[in-house]
Amino acid sequence: MSTPPYRLKAGFFETLGHPARIRVLEVLSEREHAVAEMPPEVGIEAAHLSQQPAVPRRANLVVTRKEGSTVRHSPAGRHVAEPLRGARSILSGVPAGQADLPAGLRAARTERKPPS
């Protein structure tokens, strides 16, 4: 018997269930990176970061390629970043009085406003 779609979706969201993995996917959606290049952008030490791309890679969200002795990571497709953009959109749509939005989400919210 095949796995029901709702279980597959739950596994997908479990893959995204760590702040470092979400940040790794956000960084990778901008451009391909080697793990050694990511610590300043992800905000965690290299020793802790090295394992984070492995989880989305096992879930087929990240692909790798060898460049000499370096392993470079990139999203498995252009749609990988869509759930992250959707989450940002949902979170930035929360009325200002209900939640304190971090500056990054407030900025994203104002960037989407159509010109007056």
Image (cartoon, helix red, strand yellow):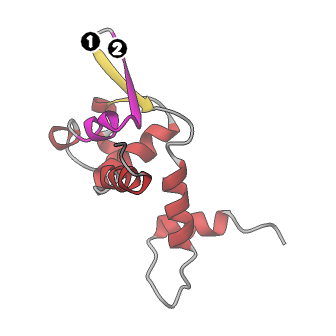
Give residue 32's quadrant in the image. top left
Numbered range of the magenta stretch:
52-67
Residue 19 screen position, x and y as percent: 31, 56
**Which is nearer the eye, 2 or 57?**
2
Eyeballing the image, is 44 above or below 116? above
Residue type at tag 1: Ser
Residues at marks 2 and 1, CA–CA distance in whole angstroms: 7 Å
Q: Please name which of the two marks, 2 or 1, marks the residue nearer to the observer.
A: 2
Question: For the point 57% across and 65% down, which residue is it?
Answer: 89
**Which is nearer the eye, 79 or 97?**
79
State the SS at label 1.
loop
Q: Spot the residue most to the top.
A: 68
**Which is nearer the eye, 116 or 63?**
63
Residue type at tag 2: Lys
Q: Which class describes the residues within 10 Å of circle 2: few (<14), some (14-19), or many (20+)?
A: few
- Per the image, the residue denoted by label 2 is 66
Looking at the image, residue 67 sits to the left or right of residue 80; the answer is left
Verify CB contact (< 8 Å) between mark 2 and mark 1.
yes
Looking at the image, residue 21 sits to the left or right of residue 28; the answer is left
Question: For the point 36% across and 12% down, which residue is it?
Answer: 67
